[in-house]
Amino acid sequence: MSHIDFRINQMSRQQVPLATHLRKESIMRFPRTVFIVTVALFFLGVALAPAQEKQEKKEVPVIAMTGGTLIDGNGGAPVPDAVVLIQGRKILLAGPSATVKVPENAEKIDVRGKFLLPGFIDCHIHTTYPFDERQFFTDTDASTTLRALYIMNLYLKSGVTSVRDVGSNVPSMQAITAAEAAGYVDSIRLFACGDVIMVTGGHGDGLKGTRAADGPWEWRKAIRQMFKDGFAHIKISPTFTLEEATAAADEAKTLGMRITAHGGGVSDTTPTTMTRIAVQAGVQCIEHLNEMEDDVLDIMARKGIYNVPTMAVYRDLYRTNQVPRVLVEKRHWTKAMHETLFQKARKRKILMGIGTDYVIDLKHYPACYFDELKYFVELGVSPMETIVTATRNGAIILGKADELGTIEAGKLADIQVVSGDPLKSFDVLGNPEIVIVDGKVHRF
């Protein structure tokens, strides 16, 4: 033992009696002290509680948006000279000024001459998808995360306030959703699927954001892993067997997850079976309108299975000759095929949502979203019904109809303000003056 160690040891032994004495004295005094302090704090808490409650109420101001024309997302007639009251994250009231009283201390936002709509929802997007082929080989989780945030912020400025990412790399999706929960990200809502599940060699296998599994139990394990990784949505992709798809749908529903399936395409069989298997298995939604028989649409209608048709991207794929030749030459795909299926789905009252899936050129965001809206109108959907598709229907597909999609009391405050009448022209969309997400006001 060194000289220094010896002295320290000796000093420690000398201090033990004093420390022991002080500790015994503190223990003897402790119960009485604790009792006195506890009683004092209790009565202090009782005295301050009403004042604290009043202070908390004062700290959450009411925002009153006044004078605008309200299109609430439910499909009813627009409400002129409307008032929308927001407190915190939620909408307190919405309706005509004659029936909605504005509190005296409310923060007023004058939107006279403007139109108020719910924030739009994109039900099919891949926010991390590469902008060019080089990025397929050079991407890192950090770069894909930043690219996703870039796309999300473009959407924020355009009035799209929620997206369902149907396949992106897990670390990026986890990072963004965790940052949103912690308040680090000031953007739009992200509903992520994590990895797309498919069989070995299936549609998308090998890309970032995919997971290959073979056999029903591997599919169940893959779904469980996505749940463990924090995801509430899942997407499956062909090819798959009925047993695999049924296992996935059953596992997802057991865990309270939403499940959708890619519909057909180059990974389908001849004759087509993939969409048929998916709807028989019990998925809640089908992505795209690709080569399916009428009775499959009948099953979808009967079971209440939703559809996200992604029409505009297919139109552009045909225009630029990017549809795989095997589909055009051997299976006789045409743009008219998708449009015919669209009309058949509408006739059966299959609920549709707006989705872009514009992986052919992510630089076309956010314009491709509004291309999709305009294409719906070209196909005979009224402007009002198209707006409902972009708002209320999207919330239904997300399983969030009780929180999002419409401007009414109790819903989360996701609202956009545009300068012109969207029922006359969708050209006024995409450049809102104000966007509110979760009650926070963004001005552009």
Image (cartoon, helix red, strand yellow):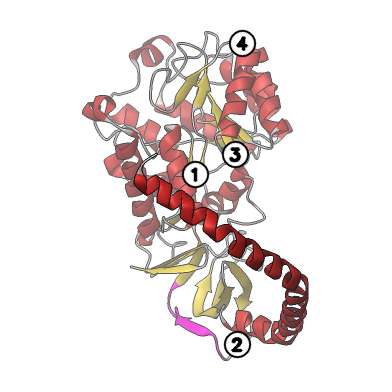
Question: Disc number at residue 8?
Answer: none
Look at label 4 and name its amino acid: Gly
- One can see residue 99 in this view: no
Q: CA distance from mark 3 to mark 2?
A: 38 Å
Q: Mark 2 — residue? A: 103
Q: Is residue 173 left or right of residue 105?
A: left
Q: Of callouts 2 and 1, which one flags the residue occurring earlier in the amino acid sequence?
A: 2
Question: Disc number at residue 354?
Answer: 1
* Secondary element at tag 3: loop
Give percent across and percent down for residue 328: 38, 16
Q: Of callouts 1 and 3, which one flags the residue occurring earlier in the amino acid sequence?
A: 3
Look at label 1 and name its amino acid: Ile
Is residue 310 shown above or below 187? above
Look at label 2 and name its amino acid: Pro
Q: Of callouts 2 and 4, which one flags the residue occurring earlier in the amino acid sequence?
A: 2
Q: Of callouts 1 and 4, which one flags the residue occurring earlier in the amino acid sequence?
A: 4
Give percent across and percent down for residue 197: 53, 23
Q: Of callouts 4 and 3, which one flags the residue occurring earlier in the amino acid sequence?
A: 4
Q: Sort mark 3 into few (<14), some (14-19) or many (20+) by Cα contacts within 10 Å.
A: some
Give percent across and percent down for residue 354: 49, 44
- Choose between 306 and 80: the one closer to the eye: 306
Q: CA distance from mark 4 to mark 3?
A: 22 Å
Front tag of 2 and 1: 2
Is residue 32 shown above or below 323? below
Instruction: Work out which quarter of the rendered image holds the C terminus and state it.
Output: bottom left
Question: Disc number at residue 215?
Answer: 4
| Magenta region, residue range | 105-114
Q: CA distance from mark 2 to mark 1?
A: 37 Å
Front tag of 3 and 2: 3
Q: Mark 3 — residue? A: 232
Is residue 318 shown above or below 68? above
**Pointer 1 with pointer 4, Cβ within 8 A:** no
